Amino acid sequence: MSNLVLRAASLAGLVSILACGSAGPLSNPWGHTPAPVAGVPEHFIPDSSFTQPPASDSTCLMHLVDPATQIRLIMVRSTGHGHVTDSTVRSAVGDYKVEPEERFGVGEHERLRVACATGRPLGKVPE
């Protein structure tokens, strides 16, 4: 009987750990569909105050800037390479922290997703 109780407690603990991880940093951030944002430029450009290699379909720049307002974007994460979704290879995307915060309607725990090859904003996603 105690062996059965021990197994049930172990299983409950494992389920709890997995459930917490599904909504936190262990989840797949690329599974989020970007939500629309207002007031963003048609595309962001490389921030010239930093030396960085040019972007391509498979790389993301660390620092971008809105050419009109000079609002900066700092990369938090990127796919690092083209990724596959629904059997289609897509260009790399990056999730950026907006500085100053709260611009473009991107909240404290949100990031602005940008297509790396074009600098085109795709929308906001959870941190």
Image (cartoon, rainbow, N blue to C red):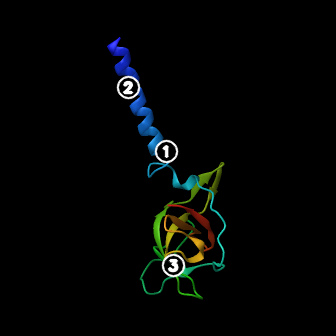
Element type at mark 2: helix
Q: How many marks?
A: 3
Q: Can residue 4 be seen at all in this image of the molecule?
A: yes
- Label 1 – label 2 distance at C-alpha: 20 Å
Q: Is residue 71 above or below residue 74?
A: below
| Residue at mark 3 | 64
Q: Which sits earlier in the primary sequence, circle 1 or circle 2? A: 2
Tell me where residue 99 appears, x and y as whole percent: 48, 78
| Residue at mark 1 | 22
Q: Is residue 66 above or below residue 111?
A: below
Q: Which sits earlier in the primary sequence, circle 3 or circle 1? A: 1
Is disc 1 surrounded by few (<14), some (14 to 19) or many (20+) residues within 10 Å? few
What's the residue type where badge 3 is placed?
Leu
Q: Is residue 88 above or below residue 100?
A: above
What residue is drawn where x is 67% and y is 67%? Answer: 36
> Foreground mark, 3 or 2?
2
CB contact under 8 Å: marks 3 and 2: no
- Label 3 – label 1 distance at C-alpha: 30 Å
CB contact under 8 Å: marks 1 and 2: no
Does 93 sit left or right of 1 as displayed? right
Quadrant where the N terminus sits is top left
- Label 3 – label 2 distance at C-alpha: 49 Å
| Residue at mark 2 | 9
What residue is drawn where x is 47% and y is 86%? Answer: 48
> Foreground mark, 3 or 1?
1
Q: Is residue 54 above or below residue 124?
A: below
Is disc 2 surrounded by few (<14), some (14 to 19) or many (20+) residues within 10 Å? few
Tell me where residue 79 appears, x and y as whole percent: 51, 59
